[in-house]
Amino acid sequence: MRAEGRAAPAPATLIPQPSTRRRRRLLWSEYRDAYLFLLPWMIGFVVWQAGPMVASLYFSLTRYEIVTAPEWAGLEQYARLFQDDRFYLALYNSAFYVLIGVPTHLLLALGAAMLLNVQVKGTSFYRTLYYLPSIIPIVANSLLWAWMFSSQYGLVNQILGSIGLPQPQWLQDPTWAKPALIVMSWWTIGGQMVILLAGLQGVPDHLYEAAAIDGAGAWHRFWAVTLPLLTPSLFFNLIVALIGAFQVFTQAYVMTKGGPQFSTLFYILYLYQNAFEDFKMGYASALAWVLFVIILAITLVQFKVANRWVFYEGELRR
Amino acid sequence: MRVEGRSGGLPQARAVERARGRPSTLTFPLTTILWHVPMAFFAVVLLTPFAWMISTSLKEEGREFELPLQLIPYPAVWSNYPTAMTTLPFPLYFENTLIVTLGALTGTLVTGSMAAYAFARLRFPGRSVMFTLLLSTLMLPDAVTLIPKFIIFRNLGWINTLQPLWVPWWFGGGAFNVFLLRQFLMTLPHDLDEAARIDGASSWQIYARVLMPLARPALITVAIFSFIRTWNDFLEPLIYLHDEKLRTLALGLRGFQDLYKTDWTLLMAASTVIILPVLALFFAAQRYFIRGIHLTGLAGR
């Protein structure tokens, strides 16, 4: 090899070993380069992320109606918030959407992924088709589904009627408006499906072989091999979907305006109305921070609980 | 692949045969054909709304309310499309959307790939801390930064301009994209950088001449994600753009809804037009989509 005499492990970039001084200079220049490459991101992190986060915490402690300067109000906004029925309603609506929407969405994505995880000609064609609804711009999709759910002439009720099922008023009915939006979300399983499909295809063959030798049937193989090895992908999808579902906005804004009877007043819609229709920036910031704390708490709990059900392949070797 | 004759006898061996490859490697042609039934059924269900949209867009005004519903409109009223496109200044909306989309896309590619390069290939103090920060911003709900960002742009006098929609993407291009590009760069052999460095190349040259050309697939993926994200975005244009002349397509379509509340034929025609560019891009570059999602899916490992 090169540089015989030296026993010190050579840093990757310095193969012909130079003098210590030159080495240090090279190292410094690598640091400098790294920070220069990172500069736009670092500025962005401070200006668009960390800064605004702190700022919104500050605004949440003020009265701020945008035309006048923020005025310190301590915890007033939070006190108001916890007495605001509309806040609890918005939280309930979003929780409903998350608790029903996220698991059903994930199960459907898993079903679609399993359907495509076979060696049959045409699976990549179907994969493209399944993914397609996921790229439709959300405003266009919302308009389309407002039409689909039209109570008298909509396709959904026409189909339900033709097979003799009841035809709810969907977007006009407070009981059915949220389920309607959840049903609509089922059409956009594409992204999760592709990730799960990759997870399925990553399951090593020898595990299936071993299971088969032990006499495991298809059903047992699914529970004992496929599902455990899929848990990392499921976990990733779950985290991302939860954060996304809490922030549902456009569908409700375009399709129902939060109605009927506030049944689709989701959290971000309520925040939007406070901030950008009523210009109550202080109150809206308090709303934002409460949501942030809720999402953070749920995510942390997810990570904690993950130890019990998420199975990483590396553990196999131990 | 499979050696049929040799392992025919033992039931266990046959079980292995069946299990090899994929859990559901389908052996009999009949099963293969039958498997297409659920696959096709699912596809039909998923694409029906889309077909319904196009069908409605071609119906005569008022006839979309005729029962029983007809899927293939007769006569097909193609003129709905020009009508929808001329009632509102859609060419102008298209131009605005293009400015925002390309501005955001370029910024994301340039600054996102720079950050990804540093995270993937350079050593520097604070790297792991910064990378953790980057990943944690993935979990940060946009709602938390929405109001302060609005106030920053208000103080800059940028409300009612297109800048708030694309300038921020010139500062790192979003954690998701940096992460995706970094994942890709990690898969390229380090020998490339070292060989170039021995030849006296600087970090900038390695980045621009060695790694970026090799990262083209990942860059295309990021470009597509960025394009679709900005093209489809609704909340931010809604907040920042008040002037009708500045509307993006998504916002313009929403304005269209106010004008033609019950004329679903025109609404569906306008929606279809807005979907078409995204659809074309998707079909032209779908393998990059799939690969990109695979790369981000690795976060789950």
Image (cartoon, rainbow, N blue to C red):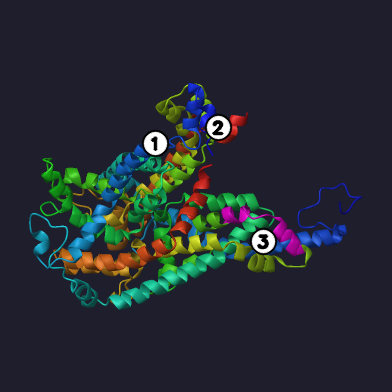
Residue on which disc 3 sits: A34
Residue drawn at x 52%, y 36% as measured from the top left:
B2
Indicate whether A35 appears above or below A245.
below
Magenta-span inclusion, residue B191: yes
Q: Residues within 10 Å of mark 2 (few under 14, many from 20)?
A: few
For the residue labelled by badge 3, is the local secondary structure a helix, a strand or a loop? helix
On residue A91, the disc is none
For the residue labelled by badge 2, is the local secondary structure a helix, a strand or a loop? helix
On residue B28, the disc is 1
Q: Is residue B100 left or right of residue B12?
A: left
Q: Position of residue A112 (x, y in %)?
A: 36, 43
Residue on which disc 2 sits: A206
Q: Share a chain, discs 1 and 3?
A: no
Q: Position of residue B262 (x, y in %)?
A: 13, 63
Between residues B272 and A60, which one lies in front from this camera angle? B272
Q: Position of residue A91 (x, y in %)?
A: 30, 44
Residue A219 image-quadrant placement: top left
Of circles 2 and 3, the one toward us is: 2
Q: Residues within 10 Å of mark 1 (few under 14, many from 20)?
A: few
Residue B297 seen in the figure: yes
Query: Spatial distance from mark 2 to mark 1, Cα to Cα?
Result: 22 Å
Q: Position of residue A298 (x, y in %)?
A: 42, 40
Report the span colored magenta: B182-197
Q: Is residue A140 left or right of residue A128?
A: left
Residue B192 image-quadrant placement: bottom right
Q: Earlier in the sequence, mark 2 or mark 3?
A: 3
As shown in the figure, which amino acid type bears the numbered disc 2? His
Of circles 1 and 3, the one toward us is: 1
Disc 3 sits on a residue from what chain? A
